């Protein structure tokens, strides 16, 4: 409201949205205070503790094809998958959260440009879809 409109502000907002979606936390969440932000919270966990902060509802595979809503309890990150598949899934999640961090950098000059964001998101999507095909 009152500030200048800029692409770099839009990129910042997009970054925060990614962090919100993948951590399941809002920037106004009660755990953020005393100088802690969603950006700092995520940055401190990356990359080794990303799975500790990821919203675990993202790891639940939902299959409603037959109308059976009891078939959504398959945690694709930690049940019968091989360690290689688990690692690949974690790499995809880390990649998206790293994009969110790059987009929400404090200094506008350090933010990723949107054409780079789009290419990185496409690469991550393709990697994830390849992972899903291997599970099938």
Image: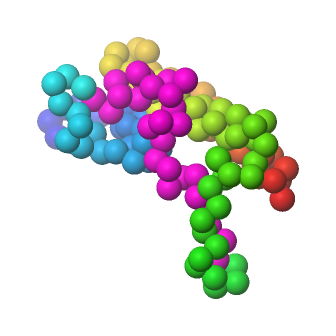
Residue 38: percent from the left, percent from the top? Answer: 33, 33
Tell me if residue 116 comes above or below residue 78 in the rendering. above
Does 57 lie within the magenta span? yes
Q: Can residue 14 be seen in the rendering of this structure?
A: no
Residue 49: percent from the left, percent from the top? Answer: 50, 28
Residue 73 shown left or right of residue 111 in the figure: right
Task: Tell how many labels.
Answer: 0
Between 7 and 131, the one nearer to me in the picture: 131
Query: Which residue is located at x 65 percent, y 61 percent?
Result: 74
Q: Quadrant of residue 4?
A: top left
Q: Quadrant of residue 26?
A: top left
Query: Where is the C terminus found, in terms of image quarters?
Result: bottom right
Does 113 lie within the magenta span? no
Query: Where is the N terminus found, in terms of image quarters?
Result: top left
Query: Which residue is located at x 48 percent, y 41 percent?
Result: 54
Query: Which residue is located at x 35 percent, y 28 percent?
Result: 41
Query: Which residue is located at x 41 percent, y 21 percent?
Result: 44
Extreme-bottom residue of the structure: 67
Residue 86: percent from the left, percent from the top? Answer: 70, 40
Q: Quadrant of residue 121?
A: top right
Residue 71: percent from the left, percent from the top? Answer: 64, 73
Q: Which residues are magenta?
A: 37-64
Q: Can residue 16 be seen in the rendering of this structure?
A: yes
């Amino acid at each position: 409201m009152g500030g200048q409109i800029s692409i770099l502000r839009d990129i910042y907002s997009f970054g925060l949205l990614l962090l919100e979606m993948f951590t399941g936390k809002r920037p106004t969440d009660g755990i953020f205070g005393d100088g802690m932000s969603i950006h700092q919270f995520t940055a401190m966990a990356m990359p080794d503790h990303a799975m500790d902060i990821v919203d675990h509802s993202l790891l639940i595979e939902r299959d409603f094809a037959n109308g059976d809503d009891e078939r959504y309890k398959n945690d694709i990150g930690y049940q019968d998958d091989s360690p290689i598949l688990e690692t690949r899934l974690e790499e995809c999640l880390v990649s998206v959260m790293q994009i969110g961090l790059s987009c929400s950098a404090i200094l506008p000059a350090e933010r990723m440009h949107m054409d780079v964001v789009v290419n990185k998101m496409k690469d991550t999507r393709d990697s994830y879809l390849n992972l899903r095909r291997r599970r099938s």
